[in-house]
Image (cartoon, grey):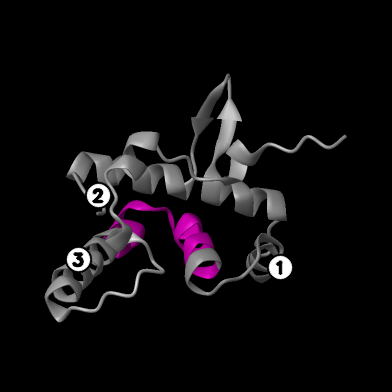
Amino acid sequence: MSNFNPDFWEIPVPPEYFEQLTTEDHLWNQESSDEIKGPRRAKRKKVLRQIHQIISNELTTRQNDCVQLYFYEGKTQEEIGVILGISRRVVSQHLFGVTRDGRKVGGAINKIRKVCRKMGIQYP
């Protein structure tokens, strides 16, 4: 049996987060009113702009490269490894960190989350 550990690659979200969402917050929701669309679209753009700044300013160059290739260009970890000349495992560590002594350390996603919490950035 494999050592499948979804916590390694999934981004955990507290259950309370989902309780505050309405059906209008779901990606598949077809909003009919421009009154509703405008503020939501503006908030989404603002949050994405802030996250992009965090990626540019807070991550190491290697983490930034991995995030850009993985999330923005849709490359696999294997493809990123080939492009950057590193192993797939190292790409994963740059993106998601590693577990040491039972705690998650490093990784671009962890750093982005930490900075978002510090800045009070949340969506919705």
121 lies above or below 45: above
Q: Is residue 108 magenta?
A: no
Q: Report the residue at 69% width, 68% height from top.
A: 79
Q: Position of residue 67 (x, y in %)?
A: 48, 61
Alpha-carbon span between mark 3 and mark 1: 33 Å
Q: Nearer the viewer, residue 74 or 80?
A: 74
Determine the CA span between mark 3 and mark 2.
Answer: 10 Å
Name which quarter of the figure residue 77 lies in: bottom right
Q: Which residue is mark 3?
A: 46
Q: Amino acid at mark 1?
A: Val
Q: Which residue is mark 2?
A: 122
Q: Quadrant of residue 17?
A: top left
Q: Position of residue 33 (x, y in %)?
A: 18, 78
Q: Are marks 3 and 1 in contact (CB under 8 Å)?
A: no
Residue to which mark 1 is pinned: 82
Dominant SS type (magenta): helix
Q: Earlier in the sequence, mark 3 or mark 1?
A: 3
Q: Earlier in the sequence, mark 1 or mark 2?
A: 1
Q: Which range of residues does the magenta coloring cover? A: 52-69
Task: Check disc 3: other Cα within 10 Å, few if <14, some if 14-19, many if 20+.
Answer: some
